[in-house]
Image (cartoon, rainbow, N blue to C red):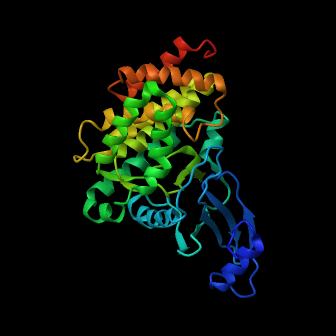
Amino acid sequence: MTLDIEQPALLVGYLREHGHIGPDETPQVQVLAGGVSNRTVLVRRESGEAWVIKQALEKLRVQVDWFSSPARIHREAAGLRWLSRLAPEGTIPDFVFEDHDAHLLGMAAVPQPHANWKTLLMTGDVQADHARQFGALLATIHRRSCDQHDQVAPAFADTSFFETLRLEPYYAYTAGQVPAARAFLRDLMDDTRRQRLALVHGDYSPKNILVYQDRLVLLDHEVIHFGDPAFDLGFSMTHFLSKAHHFPARRTAFAEAARLYWQVYQYDVEVQNFDHALETRAVRHTLACLLARVAGRSPLEYLDAAERDCQQQVVIGLMQRPPQTIPELITNFLEGLQTSCPSFAE
């Protein structure tokens, strides 16, 4: 029988059989909701120890067909081990075990009480210190991985999961849906494939951040690879700007958080190997992701149809003459919404 970790009896039997728990131990198993690419459960042991166990799905849980090899869970396991050495202390959960046959990964659970950062942001809880930590965490990963290029690059040279989980569903699919952006997106994909500068998380997003004791903890590393750090910047900046679009009453707070995030990253990264074009590429990736999150395979669930249409219109306009800096992009995007979208009001 194929193991499905969302079936508690099967999972407990598996853990006993493989010696991860005692033969007579019966931990509590809780299925965790929200993931589209994995089954995820929380296991609480009788000792008080708690694990999160993930099992990669071949067909992702989205409306449009989207497939990726379950072997990507082992890329996440490798990312977990490496990031524990590269990221600031306390920002990465501890690795526990992996199983190459069942495509499982076990890691230490972040203790309670904690909160998902996206959930906090969606309630309007925008804190400057969280944005500051977000920038410093990413800068540290990029800087240290660049400094250790000879060790890190070979371990993460395979970009196949980035192709199937990011470039195809976000950029290539969107290029097929939005002809006006096709040349921009195809050029960006080609340029992205040429860059080999740092360890790229590939899913650097508030939904993959837990806030524990006011400290950010980073999760979900299955798209990690050695490539263009500008992708992480664009992917993450998109979340601040899309929420500024969706929450007019908190627009200023989200815009300020986006600016602070970039300022901290730019100050902390301090990597001479990153050329001056990093910011320009980050602008292009932000535009591409802003469009992909309304027209790609994985649209932002909180934007309604009118908001998606408006965001698409503004972004296509900016793609004609992209801003040269992140602060300019933030200003131009919000001004574009103000001008083009009658509903975009305080």
Tell me if 197 is positioned left or right of 311 in this view: left
Number of labelled discs?
A: 0
**Relative side of 273 to 40, left or right:** left
Location of residue 41 in the rendering, given as x and y in whole percent from the top left corner: 68, 64
Of residues 190 and 147, the one drawn nearer to the viewer in this rendering: 190
Q: Position of residue 337 (x, y in %)?
A: 53, 18
Image quarter of residue 89: bottom left
Where 287 sits versus 340, above or below? below
Identified at 52% across, 32% down, the residue is 177
Q: Quadrant of the C terminus?
A: top right
Where residue 227 appears, as percent x and y from the top left, is 34, 51
Q: Is residue 22 above or below residue 147?
A: below
Q: Residue at x 65, y 61 (%)?
A: 39
Q: Nearer the viewer, residue 73 or 252?
A: 73
Residue under the image location 61 percent in, 65 percent down: 55
On the question of residue 250 being in view, the answer is: no
Outermost residue toward the bottom?
Answer: 23
Residue 237 visible? The answer is: yes
